[in-house]
Amino acid sequence: MNGAGKLFVISGSSGVGKGTLLKELLLQHPELELSISATTRKPRPGEVDGVNYFFVSKDEFMQSVENKEFLEWAEFNGNCYGTKQAWVEKQLNKGKNLILEIETKGALQIKQKMPESILIFILPPSIEELEHRLRGRNTEDEETIQGRLHEAFREIECSKYYDYKVVNDDLYKALKELEQIINGFIH
Ligand code: ADP
Ligand code: 5GP
């Protein structure tokens, strides 16, 4: 993969505000393209196939794994998530700057395969605030919330392997920090 495009990988615990930050970032930066992952998770209310994710069955997902279609994939809290290699290669070769919003196991696979990728981890101001946001979003049942909090501890531990860390306390401030990091690579 020798294209001129840059690959930014953004991770952070569920509920930390990745979706909120990225929505704002993409509105202000049409030159950035967000990768759409495949997942076996069921859509949340309002999520649209082909927009938020490609929602697939476990069989379809495992077929893609077998066909080596994924640049990376991982299981997260009982569901599988993956990024299609062909799409990433095509976009980077066209010179597009890409954002992958993925969990830590996948991110570290990317860093290994593509050391030039830029890994950014979004941290919560505190675990209490993370739990508060996760619950406030009102999209998951108690078991799922507990599972996601458990994953949060594991993921924060992995953040030491990331190139940059941004604390999402004040949304505007975090957005500016994220923009500064990205601008340093594409301008
Ligand atoms: P993620 O995509 O990381 O799972 P979301 O973007 O869905 O997280 O955010 C989880 C909840 O936290 C949402 O209700 C969102 O409005 C809220 N939120 C995001 N960023 C902040 C912030 N800086 N301060 C307070 N609440 C926030
Ligand atoms: P959610 O179910 O909240 O949409 O996503 C759960 C976790 O999976 C989040 O940390 C999200 O970043 C991650 N994720 C989404 N797409 C991918 C992907 O393609 N690969 C990997 N490894 N993780 C993903």
Image (cartoon, rainbow, N blue to C red):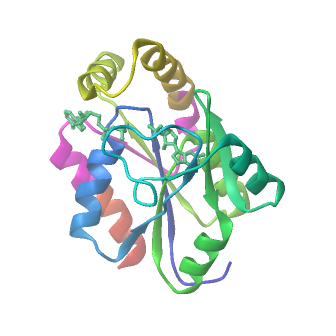
Q: Position of residue 167 (x, y in %)?
A: 32, 38
Name the image quarter holding the N terminus: bottom right
Q: Residue at image x 33%, y 70%? A: 183
- Return the x and y of residue 156 as percentages of the image width and height: 50, 30
Residue under the image location 27 percent in, 46 percent down = 20
Above or below for 157 versus 109: above
| Range drawn in magenta | 157-177
Q: Is 23 placed above or below 91 here? A: above
**Quadrant placement of the C terminus:** bottom left
Task: From the top left corner, tell me how far across and down residue 68 is, in percent.
Answer: 80, 60
Q: Is residue 18 left or right of residue 155?
A: left
Q: Which residue does the image show at 59% across and 70% down from the upper left? A: 88
Residue 38 lies in the magenta stretch:
no
130 over 161 or under it: above or below: above
**Figure quadrant of residue 139:** top left
Count all numbered tags in the image, as a single digit.
Answer: 0
Tell me what residue is drawn at x 35 percent, y 31 percent: 15
Splitting the image into four quadrants, where does ligand 1 fall? top left
Q: Position of residue 11 (x, y in %)?
A: 47, 44
Tell which of 1 and 45 is nearer to you. 45
Vertical comparison of 99 with 90: above or below? above
